Image: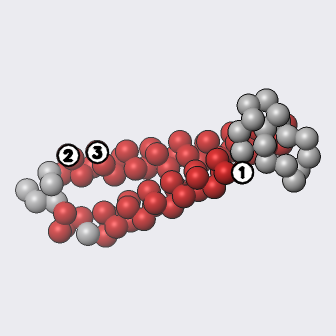
Amino acid sequence: MRKTMYNTIISLLILIILVSVIGIINTQVSLKYETGSSKECISIVTGRDLCLWIKSLKIIIIVCLILTSGMISFRYKIIRD
């Protein structure tokens, strides 16, 4: 893998992590204002399960963190000039 491709993949993974964190914050705001009580997860406005959406974003963040740390740890084996 070339160094530019490696840096692009790392940058995209970090960008996905940041967007997912913003998505979790946005969903938590929706969870506060779009549900009837604090124990409900279904949005009154959209009908989506907001708790499931938060869980899926957390899984995306964990997978991207594992991929990023793995790629950084083994960068000398991955990058070939």
Which residue is at the far top?
Answer: 45
What separation in Å lies between label 3 and label 2 (alpha carbons)? 6 Å
Callout 2 amino acid? Thr
Report the residue marked by disc 2: 4
Q: Is residue 59 above or below residue 73?
A: above
Quick one: SS at disc 3?
helix
Image coordinates of residue 72 in percent, x first then y, are 32, 64
Judge left or right: residue 47 versus residue 40.
left
Report the residue marked by disc 3: 8
Q: Quadrant of residue 15?
A: top left
- Which residue is drawn at the image coordinates 40% and 50% (left, top)? 13
Crowding near the residue tagged with mark 2, few <14, some 14–19, many ≥20 C-alpha atoms within 10 Å = few
Q: Quadrant of the N terminus?
A: bottom left
Cβ–Cβ below 8 Å for labels 3 and 2?
yes
- Which residue is drawn at the image coordinates 28% and 45% (left, top)? 8
Say whether disc 1 or disc 3 marks the residue closer to the N-terminus: 3
Q: Quadrant of residue 47?
A: top right
Image coordinates of residue 21 in percent, x first then y, are 59, 48
Say whether disc 2 or disc 1 marks the residue closer to the N-terminus: 2
Cβ–Cβ below 8 Å for labels 2 and 1?
no
- Which residue is drawn at the image coordinates 43% and 49% (left, top)? 14
Image coordinates of residue 52 in percent, x first then y, are 67, 51
Callout 1 amino acid? Cys
- Which residue is drawn at the image coordinates 79% and 48% (left, top)? 41
Residue placed most toward the observer, 1 or 43: 43
Image coordinates of residue 36 in percent, x first then y, are 91, 41
Foreground mark, 1 or 3?
Answer: 1
Judge left or right: residue 19 versus residue 23.
left
Residue placed most toward the observer, 79 or 46: 46
Quick one: SS at disc 2?
helix
Report the residue marked by disc 1: 51
